[in-house]
Amino acid sequence: MNSKDIAPSIQKVYANADDFLPLNGTDYVEFYVGNAKQAAHFYKTTFGFQSLAYKGLETGCRDYASYVLIQDKIRIVLTTPLNSKSPINDHLRKHGDGVKMIALWVDDATKSYNETVSRGAKSFMEPTKEEDEFGFVIRSGVYTYGETVHLFIERKNYNGVFLPGYAAWHSDYKPTSTGLKYIDHMVGNVGWNEMNTWVEYYQKVMGFVNLLSFDDKDISTEYSALMSKVMSNGNGRIKFPINEPAEGKKKSQIEEYIDFYEGQGVQHIAMATDNIIQTVTLLMSRGVEFLTIPSYYYKELQSRVGKIDENIDDLEKLGILVDRDDEGYMLQIFTKPLEDRPTVFFEIIQRKGATSFGKGNFKALFESIESEQEKRGTL
């Protein structure tokens, strides 16, 4: 999405952005995982990613192995330690598999680092030039919530397959794409009374604006609640909703995440498609498990969202949610957690004009999540 695609009402919000940190888009998302080779096979088989690049013993890296997967504009890096002394083990021991790096594509990684650190960001990596026969990349980075890191990637002088130190990863196993196009947004879970702290961080340190806000009246069920604010950079290409728990009768999904992740971190990654029915049908056929939506939701859907292109019976069969705003409508669905710890998951989203985040779906969605929490004994 670029600025000319954004509805006029949202444009007014973006106009308030102090865009001293121009971001071109998401470069890649890096997960620390216990077994990167097996995780790569999972993401290829189930989600339709393709092999792109590799770094490990065969390329001269003795400390860790990284597998880079690609689907359209989405790049995922899966990294695992190669010995017990690696600090990656500390992350895995505490959090399990999860997102460590959110890499942002910039024109000037040095300027991006200086701008954010001068405004109070904690340094993760000073600007570093990395080069090989294909040119050079400059990377830098700062910490955000928990142990999560924002890397700034400057690659305008590089023509290699991914980054210096990586070799092309050729594989005979090439499962077909499932139609995933790009990362629409990434959601972070933070602790009690921490949301505004991180909202201010993104405003002050990164020049983002608060695009939308939801309180516990918007996002609640009989048993649990949470609050959320959507942060966006000035051109709308990077959107980071921030969630925190709110008081309820029982434990919210945010509390469950923080308990099992043992801290703050990325809750889910929303990936866009141009045909959500086709994408979800393919994903289900490959074993991806999605949340089950209460049947009452679809009985009320037509009266709530009006005319849509899709057949409601098809949406109900797959468990796809729909919501409308002033600019159009959107369709979305959420996977179950991707590992045994009930932490990170994926969202599949298709936007047909809508720029919002599915407020009308919150009640049904959270009831579905609570049903899963009850099965796990964590509600």
Image (cartoon, rainbow, N blue to C red):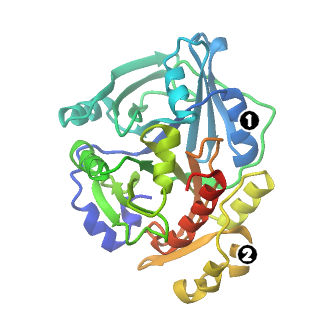
Q: Give the secondary structure at mark 2.
A: helix
Residue 229 appears in which quarter of the rendering?
bottom left
Relative depth, front residue between 150 and 342: 342
Q: Give the secondary structure at mark 1.
A: helix
Whether residue 289 can be seen here: yes
Q: Position of residue 90 (x, y in %)?
A: 50, 22
Q: Position of residue 155 (x, y in %)?
A: 43, 31
Q: Amino acid at mark 1?
A: His
Q: From the viewer's perspective, tell me whether residue 259 is left or right of residue 138.
A: right
Which residue appears at 30% of the width and 45% of the height?
A: 22
Relative depth, front residue between 356 and 60: 356
Which residue appears at 44% of the width and 37% of the height?
A: 103
User: Is there a contact, CB below 8 Å, between mark 2 and mark 1?
Assistant: no
Q: Amino acid at mark 2?
A: Asp
Is 26 above or below relative to 222?
above
Residue to which mark 2 is pinned: 314
Q: How far apart, in angstroms, are the residues tagged by discs 2 and 1?
A: 30 Å
Q: Earlier in the sequence, mark 2 or mark 1?
A: 1
Quadrant of the frame with the C terminus: bottom right
Quadrant of the frame with the N terminus: bottom left
Q: Position of residue 8 (x, y in %)?
A: 32, 73
Residue 359 appears in which quarter of the rendering?
bottom left
Residue 155 is tagged as: none
Q: Position of residue 303 (x, y in %)?
A: 56, 89
Residue 41 is tagged as: 1
Which residue appears at 58% of the width and 38% of the height?
A: 76
Whether residue 159 can be seen here: no
Relative depth, front residue between 218 and 19: 218
Residue at the outermost bottom position: 303
